[in-house]
Image: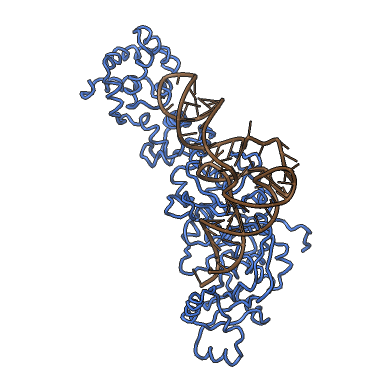
RNA sequence: GGCGCCAUCGUCUAGCCUGGUUUAGGACGCCGCCCUCUCAAGGCGGAGAUCACGGGUUCAAAUCCCGUUGGCGCCA
């Protein structure tokens, strides 16, 4: 294999499958994906399922679904369609399937004296911690198992004590690195303790697994949340101990700022919807979500707001990511979703809205061609008003159902106004006789009628609207009347005028 | 407790590296006007930031330096 001088970009998104894909995770995934696509690189999805009690396969599936919905396709990683299918050749992509690899490298560290077995029980560790706290000292492991003799070790082992493997952290020196978004960061080694690499169960800790995997998967850029910044020196130390110093030197880090809730604290369930799938259910468009997420911690110099997917890919730069945390603003997301809805073509819009219309019970499973066109016309009339796909059913229901509800206030104000019903009764036969029952034809009729009666347009339009739609707000009166068609319009006027509680 | 990171309108942010062109720009939201058959959308305009605070450096600082405070994160 002839390695080229410039390694192609390889990035990863490495979620812990302990829940859904949440907003913060989606943003991290998006930035990795954008960066990979921008540079023609590889985007890897790695499942960090070493939390044995909280990890579930359901979560894995939820994360894969969330990413797919957002349009974040990965080049390597588990497959969404089949559990056994895998893409890419640097797997396995589940950390729990890589245990032998972690064992191999921890053994290497053990043999080279760069790590050691620690037999301390959790009680001992706990005592150590409380003592440190009382003495106002940082609660770090005191290294008591660091220099155990072989005799001491076998004594512990015959006692049946389980051992974890700890890293021999250098007691002096400084570990530093250059971060693409944070610039230069430095940490004193003496402040770090001998942290655990491998738990007694043989399962690696986060730190260790990440290092082994990033090396083996030939990652070139680590793009992740800010919350991992202070973990980075530990990882660099492990890389170096493993003899991968050259590799880390070339590894670029980019620590993204956190996403906070409206109250400035870490985004959590308390703040309402936090999972990507929940936004899907609420009727958000994935394009809008992607656009909004991209602007959380990244911006262009001209502060552009709306981007197509390709626009994002061609303009995205890690260097332009901000350092300060950002607060997730649902209001702006909602606005942006409306923008995307308005940009959608009519056919596409109906297609997107269909599941929500069906869910509301307004559309049957199978549609005839005529019915399809009817829905398309209805939806098109309300498209510019919808901010969410879930708005669509309640916006079009009066056109779809004949037993649409009559809004009481509207009836009171408009239909019960003096003369309103009389006007409707007079218009009914004439509308029925109207040959040009199009928006333009209806409009002309209504305006002529107003002139003839010597009243304002509104005095004609408003009663007609309430009589045929049950409310005062809706699409353009003439346009929806055309869509409804003459028979329905006449029937509705008839029904309204005959209603006992209106006259 | 230690260490680290961050700090521009309510919110997302531009500008900061390479001080003066900034009476600090854009977007969401808010307010008003216009358009109009209603509601939206759209157009126009407005309010909203002593650039966290305090010291320096400089003829000149949001921009450079030091300190303070606050928020957040990590370590357990």
Residue A459 in the image: state x and y as whole percent.
34, 15
- Judge whether residue A96 can be spotted in this image: no
In the displayed structure, A13 sits above or below A479; it is: below
Residue A64 in the image: state x and y as whole percent.
52, 55
State the residue at coordinates (41%, 24%).
A480
Query: Would residue A481 appear left or right of A191 to someone viewing this image?
Result: left
Residue A177 in the image: state x and y as whole percent.
69, 63
In the displayed structure, B58 sits above or below A367; it is: below
The image quadrant that residue A186 belongs to is bottom right
In the displayed structure, A163 sits above or below A17; it is: below
Query: Would residue A243 appear left or right of A503 to someone viewing this image?
Result: right
Residue at the extreme left of the image, as rendered: A500
- Quarter in which the N terminus of chain A is drawn: bottom right
Closest to the observer, A354 or B34? B34
Q: What color was chain B assigned in the picture?
A: brown
Residue A394 in the image: state x and y as whole percent.
38, 35
Q: What color was chain A assigned in the picture?
A: blue
- Quarter in which the C terminus of chain A is drawn: top left
State the residue at coordinates (55%, 79%).
A164
Q: Name the image colouring.
A: by chain
Closest to the observer, B10 or A375? B10
The image quadrant that residue A416 belongs to is top left
State the residue at coordinates (23%, 21%).
A498
Count of marks overlaid on the render: 0
The image quadrant that residue A163 belongs to is bottom right
- Judge whether residue A224 can be spotted in this image: yes
């Amino acid at each position: 294999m002839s390695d080229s001088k410039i390694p192609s970009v390889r990035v990863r998104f490495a979620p812990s499958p302990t829940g859904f894909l949440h907003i913060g995770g989606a943003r991290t995934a998006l930035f990795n994906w954008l960066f990979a696509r921008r540079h023609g690189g590889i985007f890897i999805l790695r499942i960090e399922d070493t939390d044995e009690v909280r990890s579930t396969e359901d979560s894995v599936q939820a994360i894969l679904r969330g990413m797919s919905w957002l349009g974040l396709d990965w080049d390597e990683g588990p497959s969404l369609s089949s559990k056994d299918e895998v893409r890419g050749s640097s797997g396995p992509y589940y950390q729990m399937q890589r245990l032998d690899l972690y064992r191999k490298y921890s053994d290497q560290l053990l043999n080279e004296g760069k790590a050691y077995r620690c037999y301390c029980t959790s009680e001992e560790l706990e005592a150590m911690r409380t003592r440190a706290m009382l003495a106002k000292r940082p609660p770090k492991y005191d290294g008591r198992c660091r220099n155990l003799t072989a005799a001491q070790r076998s004594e512990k082992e015959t006692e049946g004590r389980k051992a974890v493997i700890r890293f021999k952290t250098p007691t002096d020196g400084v570990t530093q690195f250059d971060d693409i978004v944070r610039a230069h960061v430095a940490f004193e080694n003496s402040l770090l303790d001998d942290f655990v690499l491998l738990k007694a169960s043989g399962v690696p800790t986060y730190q260790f697994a990440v290092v082994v995997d990033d090396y083996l998967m030939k990652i070139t850029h680590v793009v992740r949340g800010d919350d991992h910044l202070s973990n980075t020196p530990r990882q660099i130390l492990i890389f170096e101990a493993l003899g991968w110093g050259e590799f880390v030197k070339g590894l670029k880090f980019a620590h993204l700022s956190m996403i906070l809730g409206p109250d400035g604290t870490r985004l959590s369930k308390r703040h309402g919807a936090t999972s990507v799938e929940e936004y899907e259910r609420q009727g958000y468009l994935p394009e809008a979500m992607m656009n909004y997420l991209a602007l959380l911690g990244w911006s262009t110099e001209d502060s552009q707001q709306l981007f197509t997917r390709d626009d994002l890919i061609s303009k995205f730069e890690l260097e332009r990511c901000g350092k300060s945390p950002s607060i997730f603003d649902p209001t702006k997301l909602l606005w942006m979703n409306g923008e995307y809805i308005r940009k959608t073509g009519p056919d596409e819009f109906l297609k997107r809205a269909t599941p929500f219309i069906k869910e509301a019970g307004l559309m049957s499973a199978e549609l005839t061609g005529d019915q399809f066109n009817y829905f398309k016309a209805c939806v098109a009339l309300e498209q510019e008003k919808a901010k969410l796909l879930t708005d669509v059913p309640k916006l079009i229901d009066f056109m779809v159902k004949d037993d649409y509800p009559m809004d009481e206030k509207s009836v009171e104000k408009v239909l019960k106004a003096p003369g309103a019903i009389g006007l409707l009764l007079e218009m009914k036969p004439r509308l029925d006789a109207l040959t040009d029952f199009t928006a333009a034809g209806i409009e002309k009729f209504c305006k002529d009628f107003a002139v003839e009666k010597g009243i304002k347009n509104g005095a004609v339009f408003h009663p007609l609207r309430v009589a045929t739609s049950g409310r005062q707000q809706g699409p353009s009166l003439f346009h929806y009347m055309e869509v409804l068609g003459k028979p329905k319009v006449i029937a509705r006027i008839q029904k309204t005028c005959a209603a006992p509680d209106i006259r």
